[in-house]
Each structure stands twice: as structure tokens, then as C-alpha cells.
Image (cartoon, rainbow, N blue to C red):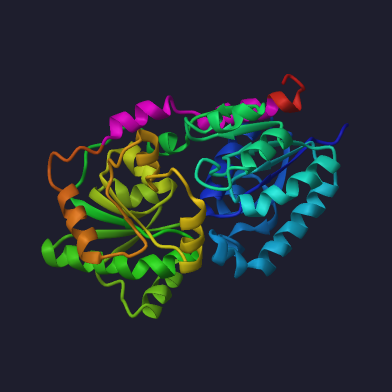
Amino acid sequence: MSAPQTLVLSAGEASGDALAAELAAALLKRRPGLRLRGLAGPKMRAAGVEAIGRVEELGVMGVAEVLGALARIRAARAALRGALAEGPAMFVPVDAPDLHLPMIPDARRAGAKVVLYGVPQVWAWRRGRAKTLAQDADELLCLLPFEPGCFEPFGGRATYVGHPALDRAGALTPRGEDWAIFPGSRDGELRRLLPTFLDVARGLRVARPGAVVRLALAPTVSAEKMRQLAQDAGRTLDDVVLVEGVLAAALPARACLAASGTVTLELACLGRPVVVAYKVHWLTYWIGRLLVRGVEHMALPNLILGRRALPEHLQRLDAGAILADLLRLGEPGQDTTSQEVRARLGPPGAAERAAERILSHLDGAI
């Protein structure tokens, strides 16, 4: 009996863990004999991916943050390099470009095909990567509808497969009566955002006595860690109820406060108004100001719609201003633009379409 085909499927943070886990499930459903291995988080491991390293030990984004995690990144790359040296059929990196893109030459030397699931934000900065990726990858599976156009001028095969936020959200649901906050999953962003988010929760409880505010824990963040982060910031969790997962916090909510990221798109697809806030290391922000060109929005729903449909607060976070936006969005009749976002994303089934493309490459049909 021949050995099973091996794919190195790898993520570098919690959002990539979720993306890769959904893809792994779709791949194994179609081809149970596949062997999937790579840097994996809890969702990937549960989906059947053999871990050569743990996503929980990485989870960094931004220039300064990456500099502070170089030892962990080097160890992760060494593990990936070892897996690629074994000659897998394909390398499928998911997000985390600073971790994964330097591994593409190793994959090529080993004779592996390269298909990216979730591409770097070349439309925002370091646009020269678009040409390199178009030439180096067999296919780029894009999650945002405008991304293929960034690679097509360079002759690359780029395919929009949809965004799994639509699958996670499911159908639109009526808004609840409570509130929800989503401060993120990475250690650095939690340390920068949690104090303001908890101040907003306190403000909600003062402005709306009896209000219930749920704080969503990412899969890579324990309740104990969240309590310690709050304590380190001179705060408590007295004004929030800790829950696990996006839906547990969002379904009962009338409006949400969220860190910029995939969760903002999930909430918009679910039909929840969202105030988006983010703060990066000062060095990352300074470099970003120099390099990012032509991008007017940071929230994914705003990027997709091409306008500021959701309020955005970046870098200098004012809890009072954020609270005012959140209270306004919590009033009846606020347009969440959910129908328009869902229409732009197209039909559900992103992971399934991505799996079909990957298997077609394995079978030589592409």
C-alpha cells in the first residue's frame, strides 16, 4: 500500500487556526487518507492536523511584536523546514505571512506545490510581494472579493473562494438585549486593548444599569489569563461575563465592540452592529504610517463596502467616544449593513471551495 499524501498545513495565530481547521475538515471529508501536519492550534488539532508546533506559542502581528518573538518564530520555522524537507505533496500556509512566506523556497526545493489560503494584505502595504507571490505560488486562494485583482497583473492564479465568516455566522438572527466585547486573541493586542474595552464595559453598566456585557474568550486565551491581564492593567472583570466563542457573546447582543480582525466580519454577517477599535505598538504604527498607502479603512466590512459603515477607532483610544458610538449603535433601527456585506461576500462554503481547488492541484487537474 502506498503512503498517504502529506500536506503541510500551517497557521500562526488564532484566526489562522480557525481558517485552517475548517479547511482541514473539508479536505479530510473529501479524502480521509490525507495526512495533514504543520504548526497547529487547538482547532486544527481537533480537526485532525498533526502538530509539529503549537500556534498558542506564536500569535504575533506587527513589526515590533514580531521582533519580540524572533526566538519563537525561528523555532517554528525550523519545525516547518524539517516537515518540508520530508517532501510533502503540498505546502498550504494560512495567514501569518512573516512566518510562512520565507518557507516557500524550502517547499519548492522539496518539490512541493504551494497554495496559499488567505493571502497577505498586499493591497495595503509591501505591494511588491504581489508579484513575488504570483510567480512563486501555484495558486492564491483569496478570502476578500477584491484581492484576486492584486495578483492577476503579474500572471498569478488567484481565486476568490469566499470568506468563512459567512459560514460561521449562519443566518441573520434578531438582535438581543445585551452587549458584547471582543478584545482579541494575541497577547500584545490584549494588553493594549483590554484596559479600554473594560472601561467601556464599566461605562455601559453605568449608562444602562443592569446591562449584561459578555467578553468573548478566544480559543487560545483562558479565563485565568484574561483575569491576569486585567489585573496587570489595574482593572477587574467585575463588569463582564466571560464566555467562550464568538456566537456565545454575539447572539444575545444588541451591539458589539471588537478588535479589528475577522471577528468584525463575522459580527456583521450575523447582523450585529459593531464598533471597531485597535491599537498597535507605537513602532508598528509609525512604520505603518510610512508604508501603508491608499487604505482608508481598517475594519473588514468597511474595506469590503468601500465606505465607513462601521465606526472605527485607531491608536489613540478614547473610552468615552467609543462608548458613545456603542450606545448609538445599540438603539433600535440602526442599520448594520449586514445584507450588503453578505451579498458582497457571495454564497457560503469557502472552505469547501478551497478544498476542491487544493485537491485539484494534488490530482494534477490544474
Query: In this orientation, does residue 342 appear?
Result: yes
Query: In this orientation, does residue 209 appear?
Result: no
Up-down relation of residue 91 to residue 311 (above or below): above
Direction from residue 82 to residue 100 in the image, left or right: left
Residue 127 on image: x %, y % = 58, 43
Give the residue at x 72% y 26%.
Answer: 361
Magenta: main secondary structure: helix
- Find residue 75 and report its image quarter: bottom right
Direction from residue 130 to residue 243 in the image, left or right: left
Tell whether position 61 is magenta: no
Residue 314 on image: x %, y % = 35, 58
Residue 236 on image: x %, y % = 31, 75
| Figure quadrant of the N terminus | top right
State the residue lying farthest toward the right.
Answer: 1
Q: Nearer the viewer, residue 332 or 225?
A: 332
Give the residue at x 37% y 79%.
Answer: 231
Q: Nearer the viewer, residue 3 or 192?
A: 192
| Figure quadrant of the C terminus | top right
- Find residue 69 and report its image quarter: bottom right
Residue 262 on image: x %, y % = 44, 46
